[in-house]
Amino acid sequence: MTAFFVVLIAFLAGVEGVAEQFQFHQPILAASLIGLATGHLIEGVVLGGTLQLITLGWMNIGAAMAPDAALASVVSAYLVTGPAQVDIKTGIAIAIPLAIAGQVLTIVVRTLTISFAHIADREADKGNVQAIDILNLAGVGIQGLRIAIPMIIVMAVGAEPVRAALASIPDVITGGLAVAGGFIVVVGYAMVINMMASPDLWPFFFLGFALSALSEVNLIGMGIIGLVLALVYLQLSPKFNNKDDGDGGGTGGGTSGGNDLDAILNDY
């Protein structure tokens, strides 16, 4: 039964890699679900959370295909939480080349599914809706098999050969991959910060660094402090209300600012 759920999660992660409806392909979900299926939820959550940080800056832009987080997540999670029982550090190191391999598989599968679109166009001209539905499901199914088949191969090989293969990798390679994984976390954060960069937000950014360095507050506490500061900022900032309009006649603009603030606060 465990094997069934592991393969099912792998299949769903592959489907979500293109559908993105429930985000099962995200490492924090995929690795945690694999950990839950194998009975080692904590290890799965820790691995998934770390891989999620690495993948923060991964995205498909135009024709550029990002490394595949789904394959990296499910296979490395199974190696960590399954019979092989490799440590989390090794799992993270393995996830990086798996993501590159998954990227190649994604390109191959998406290239194959182009033919489905052409066939669907011809069936549409004939008015054959059922054939279009079948082609749509087949395309999605292939995306699921893209992850499920490698997962089945890893499970079929067994723990000992996997452990032996991992042990045969020189330390310089696994160590280098582990260091690279640490760097990629920083790169992911940097890309996110670059997208969110705003002169108004830099004080909060550096304040967070200072608080984390000078206190023993954990991430949950830091998150609460950040939320409170954000709400206070919204209340006091002239940008979100009409206290400092200065022209005395901006009734329309002032009303709009107040409504914006109310809408933001109501969303919380």
Image (cartoon, grey):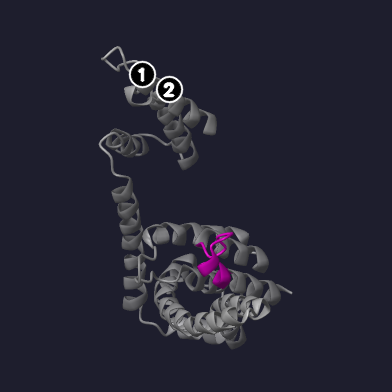
Give percent across and percent down for residue 221: 48, 35
Point out the image quarter for the N terminus. bottom right
Q: Is 134 situated above or below 185?
A: below
- For the residue pair 147 and 2, the one nearer the viewer reads as 147
Q: Is 212 situated above or below 154?
A: above
What's under tag 2, amino acid-wise?
Gly
The secondary element bearing badge 1 is classed as: loop
Q: Is residue 32 left or right of residue 61?
A: right
Dot 2 or dot 1: first in sequence order is 1
Residue drawn at point x = 38 percent, y = 34 percent:
215
Give percent across and percent down for residue 12: 61, 70
Furthest residue toward front: 126
Q: How many marks?
A: 2
Give residue 258's mark. Answer: 2
Give residue 222's mark. Answer: none
Residue drawn at point x = 25 percent, y = 36 percent:
199
Crowding near the residue tagged with mark 1, few <14, some 14–19, many ≥20 C-alpha atoms within 10 Å:
some
Disc 1: which residue: 242
Q: Is residue 265 left or right of residue 22?
A: left
The secondary element bearing badge 2 is classed as: helix
Q: Which residues are magenta?
A: 13-26
Q: Contact, CB < 8 Å: mark 2 with mark 1?
A: yes
- For the residue pair 256 and 145, the one nearer the viewer reads as 256
